[in-house]
Image (spheres, rainbow, N blue to C red):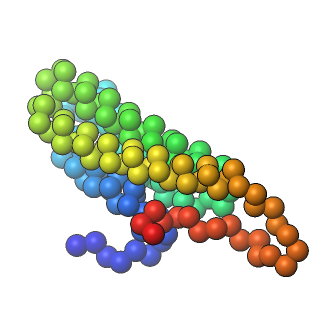
Amino acid sequence: MQSAALFDHEKLRAYQEALKFCAWAGPVVDSLPVKLAARDQLDRASTSIVLNLAEGNGKRSHADRCRYLDIARGSALECAACLDVLQVRNHLALEPCKQGKTVLLGVVSLIAGLIARFSAVDRTDHRLREGEDDSTPDLGNENE
C-alpha cells in the first residue's frame, strides 16, 4: 500500500498511472536479454515518464511545465513503441503487450489533459495588477 502523498506531483493521476506502468514494466525488463536494445530503452523511457512528470510539476512557469510534460508524453509513446518492437521480435507475447499499452494510453491521455490545462492558462490574461498576489494558479492536481 502506498503512503500518503508528500509532494504535489504524487497527487497527480498521471504520475500514479506512470508509476503503475513502471512497476508493470520492471518484470518485463528483467525477463529480457541484457544486450537487447529495446530492453534498455523500455527501462529508461518508463523511468523518464515518472521523473519528467515530477520535475515538470515543480516548475513555476507554465511553459516549463508543458515542456517537461511533453517529454513525459514522448517517453510514454516511446514505451509503446518498445512494446511493439518486443512483440514483433517475439520477446513479448501479444496479451502482455496489450496490457502495457492500455496503461500507457491512460498515461498519455492524462498528460495530454495536463498540457491542455496549462496551455489554456497561458492563453488567458495573467498580467499582475496592483494589489494582486503574484503566485501562479495551482493546477498541479488534475484530480480536482
Quarter of the image where one finds residue 15: bottom left
Residue 87: x and y in percent read: 18, 26
Q: Is residue 137 left or right of residue 94?
A: right
Residue under the image location 64 percent in, 56 percent down: 121
Quarter of the image where one finds residue 43: top left
Q: Is residue 54 left or right of residue 129?
A: left
Q: Is residue 6 above or below residue 34?
A: below
Residue under the image location 45 percent in, 37 percent down: 74
Q: Is residue 99 above or below residue 61?
A: above
Q: Is residue 48 visible?
A: no
Residue 8: x and y in percent read: 49, 69
Residue under the image location 80 percent in, 76 percent down: 132
Query: Could you say which is closer to the camera, residue 21 or residue 136?
Result: 136
Query: Could you say which is closer to the camera, residue 103 or residue 39?
Result: 103
Q: Is residue 106 visible?
A: yes
Query: Could you say which is closer to the camera, residue 117 or residue 58?
Result: 117
Q: Quadrant of the N terminus?
A: bottom left
Instruction: Name the residue furthest top.
Output: 89
Instruction: Name the residue furthest front.
Output: 124
Instruction: Name the residue furthest right.
Output: 130
Q: Is residue 48 left or right of residue 23?
A: right
Residue under the image location 18 percent in, 20 percent down: 89
Residue 17: x and y in percent read: 32, 55
Q: How many marks?
A: 0
Q: Quadrant of the C terminus?
A: bottom left
Residue 49: x and y in percent read: 42, 47
